Image: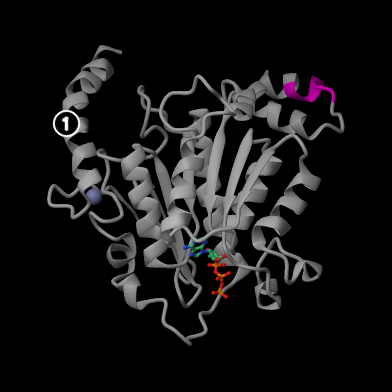
Amino acid sequence: TKVQDMSAEVVDSNPYSRLMALQRMGIVDNYERIRDFSVAIVGIGGVGSVAAEMLTRCGIGRLLLYDYDKVELANMNRLFFRPEQVGMTKTDAASQTLSDINPDVVLESFTLNITTVQGFETFMSSLRNKSFRPNKEGSGVDLVLSCVDNYEARMAVNQACNELNQTWMESGVSEDAVSGHIQLLIPGETACFACAPPLVVASGVDERTLKREGVCAASLPTTMGVVAGLLVQNTLKLLLQFGQVSPYLIGFGFNAWLQGYNSLKDFFPTMEMRPNPQCSNAACLERQKEYLIVKPARDAAIIAK
Ligand code: ATP
Ligand code: ZN
């Protein structure tokens, strides 16, 4: 039986053998493909740093890290950063820890604010850069993870990804630290962040008023760890095509675009969000038009399979 086959495998000290076992157990067809993928993480805070560590331990090919902030003592109620890193930029501190954990991962870090003109330009050009995999189609990265904590930064990620036709995932934890969400965004195919801001939908709270000046938000390593775990699990499913795989390129493994998490009730609501034909984002409307053109052929390909 399968179980006996497994026990016959030699257990060694290489961390990759535990990951390759996913293949022997029939979960993933080709785990080694993880080495080909580039993931950009915007915001290396409570969620982003943990997501970066998970992807590093999974052996991701390349990580691009963006944050403008420094490590503070106040961050110690979260995972990842250590007291001796206080005062370092989050990008430097993260690169230090991540390269120690797994020197095989190509790390690129950007200490910048993506909402400034200069920061946004550098962000865009770094996503376009294809030096890691010159023959890759589309942009230079496979996925962008948004792990920021404010509306303007999410709108900047949304703008960049709509312009580049780049699939991305958004994440967030509520101000009271007991709920969170992740959302998959595929330009033209799903709602973009401007089509319907997810937090408004998920919690009834308008996020523009959520991050208030002078208000000390609560945070818990548990909720942030759960959200980072959901985010990276979905990243692995998307990149390595396992889980509920539907027969064509994108959207596989996901029966919902928006997943909420309420820790007080252990409640995980999910919903699908279609693009808004009246979206205020011009690049979103362009992607929506393109999607309507390719959709019939993709639907036909599914039926043929
Ligand atoms: P808190 O404000 O609650 O003390 P925090 O600022 O570390 O914590 P987190 O939710 O843990 O917030 O992480 C969000 C991260 O996103 C932060 O590290 C922050 O610096 C980063 N971030 C937010 N906006 C931008 C931006 N425009 N450009 C780059 N990084 C950003
Ligand atoms: Zn939109």
Q: Position of residue 144 (x, y in %)?
A: 47, 44
**In the rendered view, would you say 255 is above or below 156?**
above
**In the rendered view, would you say 305 is above or below 267?**
above
Quadrant the C terminus occupies: top left
Q: Reply yes or no: does residue 12 show up in magenta.
A: no
Q: Position of residue 34 (x, y in %)?
A: 61, 29
Give the image quarter of residue 212: bottom left
Whether residue 258 is visible, yes or no, is no
Q: Position of residue 153 (x, y in %)?
A: 42, 61
Secondary structure found at label 1: helix
Quadrant the N terminus occupies: top right
Q: Residue at x 81, y 69 (%)?
A: 84
Stretch of the chain drawn in magenta: 6-10
Whether residue 147 is visible, yes or no, is yes
Q: Residue at x 43, y 61 (%)?
A: 116
Q: Residue at x 72, y 59 (%)?
A: 93
Please rate how many residues cluster around mark 1, counting C-alpha atoms within 10 Å: few if below 14, some from 14 to 19, many from 20. few
Decide if residue 301 is on the left or right side of residue 239.
left
Q: Residue under circle 1?
A: 292
**In the rendered view, would you say 196 is above or below 124?**
below
Decide if residue 277 is on the left or right side of residue 69.
left
Which residue extends farthest front?
Answer: 118
- Camera-side residue of 132 and 251: 132
- Residue flagged by tag 1: what amino acid is it? Leu
Q: Residue at x 41, y 58 (%)?
A: 117
Magenta span dominant secondary structure: helix
Which residue extends farthest left?
Answer: 278
